[in-house]
Image (cartoon, rainbow, N blue to C red):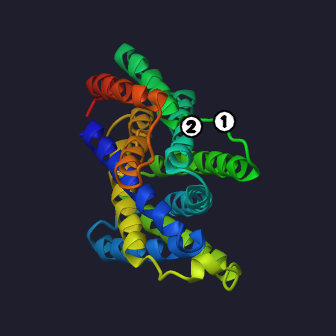
Amino acid sequence: MTTLLALGAALFYGVSDFAGGLAARARRPAAVLLAAQTTATAALLLCLPFATGRPDGTELLLGASAGGCAAVGSLCLYTALARGPMTTAAPLTAVLVAALPLGFALLTGERLGPTAWAGAPLAVLSVALIARPGTAPSSAIERATVLHATVSGAAFSAFFVLLARTDPTSGLTPLALAYLTATCAFAASARLVRGKRSGRLQETGFPWRLSLTAGLTELAAHLCYQYAAREGLQGIAAVLTALYPAATTLLASVVLRERPTRTQLAGYPLAVGAVVLLALASPG
């Protein structure tokens, strides 16, 4: 079950990044994120009475902190997706998302068996290959895109670690608080950039469909990851979830005709092998 939930999270994160990246090309990332997060927050609050749990002060603090990290990660990621190719921007984030939570899990006492030790590095390598851009960043915009994607990866890594450390008895309350915190941050950011949109952005209508798709699929991804990390090993759940660039790059290739490089294509079979090994190592 841990493997299926983590792979579900990867699929939903990949779709969310793709839809959000397209929307961010039509409107400022903060505005897109505000629309997406408001929709997801409303949906989560409707589900909250059925899974409130018994959170204490620590769980609430973890949720609020996770929301702050998610806000930073999302703003940086959507900015990167809006500025550069999706086949470069989104996957770069995943390299850190795969490595940092795994390293934290090992440092805090999580123990992996031989199969997991074989699968985890293979998964990180596959993400690195899928994330590899066709050419080195040469312009200031491309370098800024790489910087935004890197900061996003570090922030999302912290989000994953904080969310995984919430107690199962706390239900969905920490995640709901995380969403409320992130939504407030996006509202403040959208207000700061209000009126500063370029003419190109003003010519098109607001991408409501893409924004709502991004928000709801991200919520589904968060739920899948939270339960995967709670049921099994956090390190394995994080590494499997970090395979989400495969979905983003496949969608970008089919819809936007962004052709993946040979190196990126080589990462896909390695990812499949890693999934098999980590599935065998997963206790759930």
Give x and y (percent) for residue 253: 39, 47
- Marks 1/2 in contact by CB < 8 Å: the verdict is yes
Seen as rendered, the residue at the extreme right is: 140
Which is nearer the eye, 61 or 199? Answer: 199
Q: Which residue is mark 2?
A: 133
Residue toward you, 177 or 143: 143
In this view, 283 is above or below 86: above
Residue at the (66%, 36%) spot, across then down: 136
Callout 2 environment at 10 Å: few (<14), some (14 to 19), or many (20+)?
Answer: many
Asked whether residue 40 is in view, the answer is no
Q: Which residue is mark 1?
A: 136
Residue at 36 percent of width and 55 percent of height: 255
**Label 1 crowd (10 A; few <14 / some 14-19 / many >=20):** few
Q: Is residue 192 left or right of residue 171?
A: right
Relative vertical location of residue 178 with respect to residue 256 in this rendering, above or below: below
Of residues 261 and 35, the one drawn nearer to the viewer in this rendering: 261
Q: Residue at x 40, y 16 (%)?
A: 118
